[in-house]
Image (cartoon, helix red, strand yellow):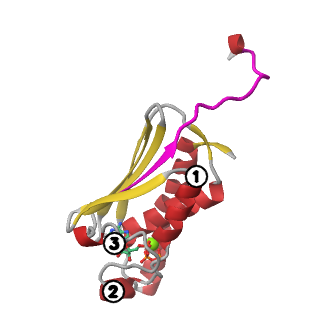
Amino acid sequence: EYVNLNEFLAYIINRFDMMIHSDEENAAESGAPKKHYVIKRDFTSQDIWQEIDTDKMTQVIDNLMNNAIKYSPDGGTITVRLFRSREHVLISIADQGLGIPRADLAKVFDRFYRVDKARSRQQGGTGLGLAISKEIVEAHRGRIWVNSTEGKGSTFYISLPYEAYDPGGDWDDETV
Ligand code: ATP
Ligand code: MG
């Protein structure tokens, strides 16, 4: 399905923005610790149209956002960027969280791999999120990778091959 990636991403992020508020209400009732975070958007002003499987790519962005929140202390900023070059669309999700040790960087996309099992177990999850994300991105002929500094934060990147949207022959070039 062809979607405007700017709108697609904004829609997902707005959902996370709303979760901050509903979580605060729930936390007030249950006494559970609440986690604050701020999401910054840095999107190109150009509209980027791209053919994607929206359900599957939503799953990828949800997992990266959930990880950014889960593996960050309270009060972190998550920055979501969207831009493109001539041949690629690039999406990045950066957090100011725990970071990933250098030795684990290549392994976090493996099935069931979790950094520091004791720490991760408390936080819940299966260690499948990134493995599934990688499969989905690669099914879109894209790539996913991460840069991280332990104790400072992580940035996950997704690149997709960009193909200029061609609506076909029904359009009159002079009126578009
Ligand atoms: P789930 O299956 O619920 O997603 P998970 O979050 O543990 O479980 P993945 O999303 O595959 O699994 O992540 C694998 C591991 O990579 C995590 O357990 C965590 O150790 C590390 N990790 C992932 N994202 C981050 C991040 N943003 N900051 C720090 N560590 C991360
Ligand atoms: Mg996860």
Task: Give the Cα separation between the discs numbered 2 and 1.
Answer: 31 Å
- Residue 101, given in percent of the width and then of the height, sits at 24, 71
Q: Which residue is mark 2?
A: 117
- Residue 172, given in percent of the width and then of the height, sits at 75, 15
Residue 171 is covered by the magenta coloring: yes
Q: Residue furthest top?
A: 174
From this view, report whether residue 19 is shown above or below residue 176. below
On screen, residue 86 versus residue 104, left or right, reads: right
Task: Give the Cα separation between the discs numbered 2 and 3.
Answer: 13 Å
In-front residue for pair 31/168: 168
Q: Kindly state the secondary structure of the residue where label 2 is placed.
A: helix
Q: Kindly state the secondary structure of the residue where label 3 is placed.
A: loop
Looking at the image, which residue is at 63% across and 32% down?
A: 165
Q: Nearer the viewer, mark 2 or mark 1?
A: 1
- As shown in the figure, which amino acid type bears the numbered disc 3? Tyr
Mark closer to the chain start, 2 or 3: 3
**Quick one: label 3, few (<14), some, or many (20+) residues within 10 Å?**
some
Magenta span: predominant SS is loop
**Quick one: label 2, few (<14), some, or many (20+) residues within 10 Å?**
few
On screen, residue 14 versus residue 75, left or right, reads: right
Ligand 1 within 8 Å of disc 3? The answer is: yes
Q: Quadrant of ligand 2?
A: bottom left
On screen, residue 73 versus residue 137, left or right, reads: left
Q: Can see residue 67?
A: yes
Give residue 96's quadrant in the image: bottom left
Task: Give the Cα separation between the discs numbered 1 and 3.
Answer: 27 Å
Give residue 2's quadrant in the image: top right
In-front residue for pair 31/138: 138
Q: Which residue is mark 1?
A: 140
Q: Which residue is mark 3?
A: 71
Q: Nearer the viewer, mark 2 or mark 3?
A: 2
Residues drawn in magenta: 156-172
